[in-house]
Amino acid sequence: MKKLIAISLLALIPLAGMGQKFLTKTGKISFFSSTPMEDIEAHNQQVNVSLDLSDGAMQFKVLIKSFVFEKALMQEHFNENYMESDTYPTSTFKGTIKDFKKIDLSKNGVYKVEVTGDLTIHGVTRSVTTKGTIEVKGGVLVGTSDFKIKLADYKVKRPKAVAEEIEIKVSFEASKL
Amino acid sequence: MKRKVLILIVLAVVAAISLWAVYRYVYNKPHRDYASESAAHTLTADSLYRVYSSSAGVADSLYTGKVIVVSGVPEKFEKIDTLTVAVFVMDEGDFGPQGVRCTFTGKLPEEAYRPGNLLNIKGYCTGYNGEDVILESCVPVPSI
């Protein structure tokens, strides 16, 4: 009998971490760059996002082929020539939210956060730190972040007309598992 | 003199038409209309997920970048902005329940939403992200 109680109690331990994991598969990532000839803009609304507020872990995963451009030709070049998405189908981020403990899930609130982690684009991984906002809204975590990356840092070829840096916007609404 | 001018005018017109054609059909070419293309394969959402999760390389060569028809009973529908996603769940992973996700830009017929209803979906398979197989530009198709 004692063994049974002990085992049952052990089985409950994983539950302590539950109720802190927030997920979505419809996160949004957009990027922008302007050239003298035209604007480059693409959106992806199928981003996987996971946040674990028990340890501040944050993960993103996005399928490169799901980025939609207005111009079909631009989308084709993006996949075939620049991102080489047949070879590198996904882009990922694995990191931690600094000060995640200050996020109070019991009430609505907005928090400025700093996130540090490994960003992998085009098969190249680099450590990045970005600032963002996390809002607790009716039990859902709403996150946003704006940052810039240098294409050359990720060995992405670029036509001379395109700027070296592109602006990336991330937004998501993650619900409890 | 008149002949030369005529030839020059004809050349100029031909050049203008070619430039316009390149602009219209190459530079500004429209996105593929996947709904009007015929499917390369037809299979259950279950089988599709199984092939991708066990042999991604094989699945890639067979289905990625192709228009396919999948059938199954969706677990749920998600709505983001103007998109509706039919979600088929076969497994659990890092990002929660996973399986096959089909994104529709248009509206689905009402009966599609009835729980337990078998759906046949034609869409463009963009591939596998390690968790789900993603189909885009989806349209419902009548039962085969």
Image (tube, coloured by chain):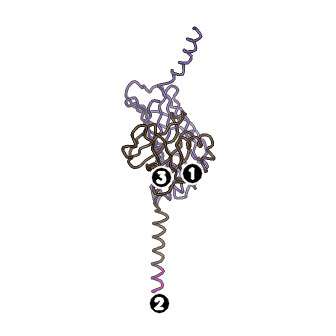
Distance from label 3 to label 1 (Cα)? 15 Å
Which residue has dot 3 on it?
A33
Residue B3: mark = 2
- Residue A113: image x %, image y %? 46, 33
Q: Tell me the residue at 46%/91% (across/down).
A: B1
Q: Which residues are magenta?
A: B3-11
Magenta stretch, main secondary structure class? helix
Picture quarter containing residue A158?
bottom right
Residue B15: mark = none
Q: Which chain is purple?
A: A
> In front here: B3 or A35?
B3
Task: Give the residue furthest to the bottom.
Answer: B1
Residue A83: mark = 1
Relative height, residue A9 to residue A158 (above, below): above
**Lower position in the chain sequence, tag 3 or tag 1:** 3
- Residue A166: image x %, image y %? 50, 49
Q: Which chain is brown?
A: B
Identify the element where label 1 is drawn.
loop
